[in-house]
Image (cartoon, rainbow, N blue to C red):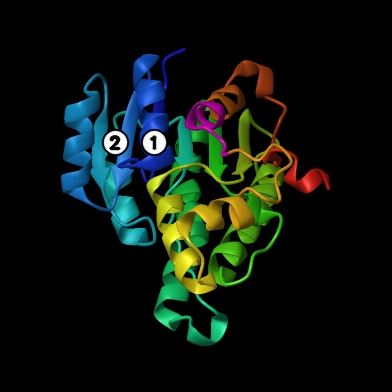
Amino acid sequence: MIRSILITGAASGIGLALAQRFVATGQRVIACDLHEAALEKVRGEIGGTIRTLAFDVADARQIEAAMAQVHDDPPAILINNAGLQHVSPLEEFPPEKWQQLIAVMLTGPALLTRAALPAMRARNYGRIVNIGSIHGLIASPFKSAYVAAKHGLIGFSKSIALETGDSDITINTVCPSYVKTPLVESQIAALAATHHLTPERVVEEIMLKPMPKRQFITLEELTGTVEFLLSDAARNITGQCITLDGGWTAQ
């Protein structure tokens, strides 16, 4: 069935891969990001049935205005993907940066879910997928805000799963280990500087070392997992954390 899918952080990385996959299958994609220019580039590259909205996911008024623009076709599916990273010891972590990470990756999904739920309830159908992280399950040094936000996202999803248990609405969190995206590329550079290592050693000794399979998660694996969670076969999977980690948390 063709449905309307709203994806945040859709201008690059995981969000862009999701937008490409769902446009290719004929879905009505609403690609969202903070920067209009980046979205224009995405629309030019993907084409198809894509719509774009530029807004700040951490701003309730901007979310309200964005949802008003799609009132004619409100999203039946919400994919909360927008994210950013900052690597620093807590003593050197700028307070405004900490607040920004929490706002984008925890408050933002809550605000968007709040905005999307009324239309989902009205049609008695909705699928919400949060793009979490292995860092929603385990911790790493120098990533305190990111780890806190991703842990919180899993707890948020469980609460909303209970609140929507009386309808055909599901909410789940996909938690991959490292996916080779622009965000991870920036992490490699930041970790290299923090640990005084080469980028190659960061990949081998920090990122992939905890994974028995010792390989990055691919965008195809991740988008395929999300697609499954949107399928009828997954209608009773809700409040769950779906982990793609190459065996990391099996240890």
Say the numbered circle drawn on residue 167: none
Residue 223: image location, x then y, percent: 51, 29
Say the numbered circle drawn on residue 6: 1
Q: Secondary structure at mark 1?
A: strand
What type of secondary structure mainly makes up the magenta span?
Answer: helix
Q: For this view, does 66 lie left or right of residue 87? A: left
Q: For this view, does 134 lie left or right of residue 77? A: right
Does residue 86 appear in the picture of this structure? no
Instruction: Say which residue appears at 52% left-offset and 42% top-offset.
Output: 179
- Residue 218 drawn in magenta: yes
Label 1 to label 2: alpha-carbon separation: 10 Å
- Above or below: residue 4 compared with residue 102: above
- Tell us which disc is closer to us: 1 or 2: 1
Of residues 127 and 215, the one nearer the viewer is 215
Mark 1, other Cα within 10 Å: few <14 / some 14–19 / many ≥20: many
Give the amino acid type for the residue marked by disc 2 in the picture: Val
Give residue 20's quadrant in the image. top left
Does residue 224 appear in the picture of this structure? yes
- Above or below: residue 149 compared with residue 117: below
Residue 190: image location, x then y, percent: 44, 65
Instruction: Say which residue appears at 32% left-offset and 33% top-offset.
Output: 30
Instruction: Say which residue appears at 47% left-offset and 74% top-offset.
Output: 98
Residue where numbered disc 2 is placed: 70
Residue 144: image location, x then y, percent: 59, 71
Q: Report the magenta residues as a range.
A: 216-223
Given contact means CB atoms under 8 Å apart, are the residues at marks 1 and 2 in contact?
yes
Residue 40: image location, x then y, percent: 16, 38
Give the amino acid type for the residue marked by disc 1 in the picture: Leu
Give residue 205's quadrant in the image. bottom right
N-term mark: 1 or 2: 1
- Residue 191 drawn in magenta: no
